[in-house]
Amino acid sequence: MIQRIQQKSLPMLFSLLTFLLVFSQFLEIYQITHPVKNLASIAALCLIAGLIPYRLLKLPVFVLTAARIIYAFVPLNQDFSLGWFSLFTATVQDRIAMFLNGEVAFIPIELALVVVISLITLLIELQIEYSRFLLSTVINVGYLLLMATYNDLDLSWTIVFVICNALFLRLLSRKKKGDRLMLYGGVLLLLLFSGALYLPRQYAEDKLLEVSADVRTKLNQAGFYHYFERQKSGIQPFSRTGFSENDDSLGGPLLDDHQILFEAQQRTGHYWRVESKGHYTGKGWINSSSYTASVELQENRTLYLSENNYQGDFGEQELITLDFQYPGEYLPVPYGNLAIQNVSGASDFHVSSENGRIDYADRQSRSQTEIQWLPWDYELSDLAELTVSQPNEEVDYLQLPGTLSEAVKELALEITDDEETLLEQVTAVESYLKLSGTFRYSKMDAHLTPDDQDYVEHFLFDSQVGYCDNFSSSMVVLLRTLGIPARWVKGFTPGSVANEGENQIYTVRNSDAHSWVEVFFEGFGWLPFEPTPTFSQPLNQEVEDIPEETEASLESEEETQTTSNSEATEEVTTTEENSTDSFFRDLWNSMQGFMRNHGSKIGFLMLLVTGILFWRWSFYLAILFLLKTSKQPIVTIYPLLLKKIEKQVPRPENQPLSQYAEEAERALPFLSNEFIVVTKVYEKGLYSQSRIKKNREDLMKSLALKLSKWKP
């Protein structure tokens, strides 16, 4: 027993530290803080694993102790007895049913305790009894990453500590190799800790995020992160794509939500405008006023709207039929002259003169609206000679917060230094944000704006990573510093399209929400511009003639054209797609698209790994092959074994094989006297034609395996 205590004391100590930390993180998630119970629980499990050598005795003691630990945290107003055990079992069954039926969105504490205590018991036994430090650490780190994913926790230091603990245990288990190894191991651990403390973590994180951006974006588009976010317990959720009424605080990661909002039957695709906002607060956007007015419908209960300042040409008139599947009030419309008529589900409209927003007065959850659309048809060359002019409106479209720094204005002047006309300045700012390569588009990596910093400044000079809200807000602010009237606009991109006869059906979802920019041009009014990378100009969004085989690429394109500015309203999220099957189907489609795009890279990587593994074990595989095919395998195989050993233990010229075998065994103790036996068999086999015995074949196989595993 004393010898076992000496042997297991350090593994018990380091296992206690590791699992005390892991179990504490688990209890913190469920808001349970009891350091004494935590310490006593893990210490008891470590003592059982370290002090009891008999498996038949250890198992029931583990079970009883685990039950006592669970009782300490969930007593259920009972004494620790069979009555408590019966009640707890029934409670766990009830909680499992509730979780599977969706009555609770997180794993109940009773069920979670059973799983976690069982896992910790198994891992403690693996570390202390069987010295499986690598396997235990991989499972521990995976569990901690899972907790961080579900609960938005920063467990980086915990993970570093767990890994260092495992490395030190591994070094202790190899202490017979010498003090030098311990010294090297200590230096390695010191470097690891120093690196975690002093290396530029932000730089490393940014590089890792940039490399993995494509994969994480595809997972987000497939709904992977949104699915996880819905399972979280007691944590403030991420913002989700969708049209939001509140834009006064922008920024932070954005999760895709594929709730269907409406379907449009039409010939061509285009952006759907909902409203503009003109007052920039330094953190987001608000309206200058909340003024709305009811509009009298004219003949045939039709609402006629047009841009009074527009004097350009028009395209061919088109009929658009909108079918709504959400309970919101706003009506998204295209750019152009409009004649709007309700078919069913609504009767009247409210229209805001400030931001151009159209709201239904009394729309039902499902309704249908028809729009006779006369689209604008102008070329950028039509704007080439126009100069800056101010719109005749009450809103100040040059407004900027007094806290905006001069650095933003200096950047705008630098971007437009060589540009003379209004159009050249506008397109220069648009191209700088969209095409310069300075900024990266990502919904997952967008930063929250620090409290003491301006939203646009933080994006332009610090994070330089974001989605449409970052790019569009930055363009408006940059243009306003130059005295160019501009405003922030929000709505939807065209959506996904399916062919149906002459017209096409465009399905618009929360994930198609978007924001862009409008600039005032005299004689044309407010015209749209698109500064966000991978998106096209709002008036040129035609999606047609799409073959079936490119459907996957369309989904990929849709992914880059799906974003918004903040949380979807509570009413919208209550009608979101709640089918887990849909999530997994979307995830599978995304994985297929990923494999199509990156299959060759993955195949090459797998081939490379296979080649490395084959090379690593090629010697052993060759020996196995010769054992099966050679008539006198000892004569064929022994020279190969001899050559392998001679690389590390040189053999003097003309030295007898038996004498060399003894020297090799002394130099390489792991050979375990097998090389001496095989040498004697070889010398005998040279003078005999009989096949060697089966046990000698196994001996050569064992020797080949040891030499393959051996790392000089």
Image: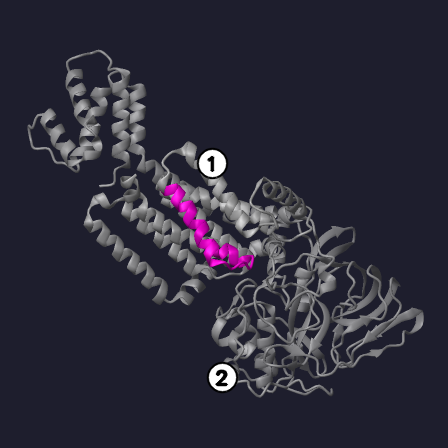
Residue drawn at x 75%, y 74% as measured from the top left: 313
> Range of the magenta residues?
24-50
Depth check: 256 or 667 in front?
A: 667
Q: Position of residue 121 (x, y in %)?
A: 45, 44
- Residue 185 is left or right of residue 559, and the answer is left
- Is 408 situated above or below 261? below
- Residue 699 is left or right of residue 540, and the answer is left
Q: Which residue is mark 1?
A: 60
Q: What type is the residue that disc 2 sits on?
A: Ala
- Residue 687 is left or right of residue 401, and the answer is left
Depth check: 486 or 328 in front?
A: 328
How far apart are the two marked residues, 1 and 2, measured between alpha carbons? 70 Å
Depth check: 709 or 317 in front?
A: 709
Q: Position of residue 478 (x, y in %)?
A: 57, 81
Depth check: 358 or 126 in front?
A: 126
Residue 407's label in the rendered image is 2
Q: Position of residue 631 (x, y in %)?
A: 26, 15
